Image (cartoon, rainbow, N blue to C red):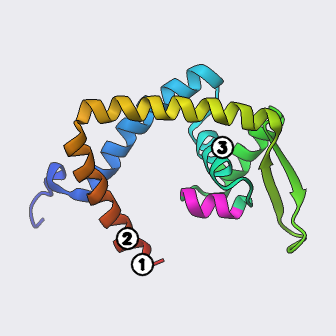
């Protein structure tokens, strides 16, 4: 054994831990308000941002496994918040879009997300939040180059 790895000093561990803590807190809010899971929220958020896309693209953007995306899509469709149509460019793929009801719920989720972020920024302090944002952007930029 070459020694112990102090996890509190290991950046990948800390990034995952911080992400999990924040995500759990936010998930409790949208779960209580809308009964949706984390994969459903992530699918909703990406569809709302893009206006429509494929399950493959949702998986790529969210880093979720295709089975999680598939289950989230099925759950949102069952609730009437998402519709599927065959992609004209690739008949094997389906284009996913929010329904009118889904768009309404998405708007409410956006308000919930903005409120949560405002609280988080207040708790962190705006200067620390700006530094964190810059650091996260640098990490993403570095590792997105490799994909």
Highlighted range, magenta: 56-62
Identify the residue position indicated by label 1 in the image: 145
User: How would you classify the magenta stretch by its main secondary structure?
Assistant: helix
Kind of element beneath mark 1: loop
Q: Position of residue 12 (x, y in %)?
A: 28, 58
Identify the residue position indicated by label 3 in the image: 44
In depth, the one of 141 and 75 nearer the eye is: 141
Specify the farthest residue to the bottom.
Answer: 146
Between the residue at mark 3 and the residue at mark 2, the CA separation in whole angstroms equals 24 Å
Q: Position of residue 76 (x, y in %)?
A: 75, 38
In the rendered view, would you say 16 is above or below 40? below
Residue that appears at 64% across and 40% down: 40
Left or right for 127, reference 52: left
Specify the farthest residue to the top.
Answer: 32
Q: Position of residue 37 (x, y in %)?
A: 60, 35
In the rendered view, would you say 36 is above or below 97? above
Kind of element beneath mark 2: helix
Identify the residue position indicated by label 2 in the image: 141
Specify the farthest residue to the left.
Answer: 3
Q: Position of residue 31 (x, y in %)?
A: 58, 26
């Amino acid at each position: 054994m070459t020694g112990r790895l102090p996890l509190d000093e290991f950046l990948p561990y800390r990034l995952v831990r911080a992400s999990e803590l924040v995500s759990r807190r936010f998930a409790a809010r949208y779960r209580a308000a809308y009964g949706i899971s984390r994969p459903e929220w992530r699918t909703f958020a990406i569809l709302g941002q893009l206006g429509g896309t494929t399950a493959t693209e949702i998986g790529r953007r969210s880093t979720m496994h295709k089975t999680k995306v598939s289950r989230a899509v099925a759950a949102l469709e069952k609730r009437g918040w998402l519709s599927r149509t065959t992609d004209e460019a690739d008949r094997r793929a389906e284009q996913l879009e929010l329904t009118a009801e889904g768009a309404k719920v998405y708007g409410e989720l956006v308000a919930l997300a903005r409120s949560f972020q405002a609280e988080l920024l207040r708790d962190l302090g705006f200067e620390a939040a700006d530094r964190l944002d810059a650091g996260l952007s640098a990490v993403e930029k570095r590792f997105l180059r490799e994909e």
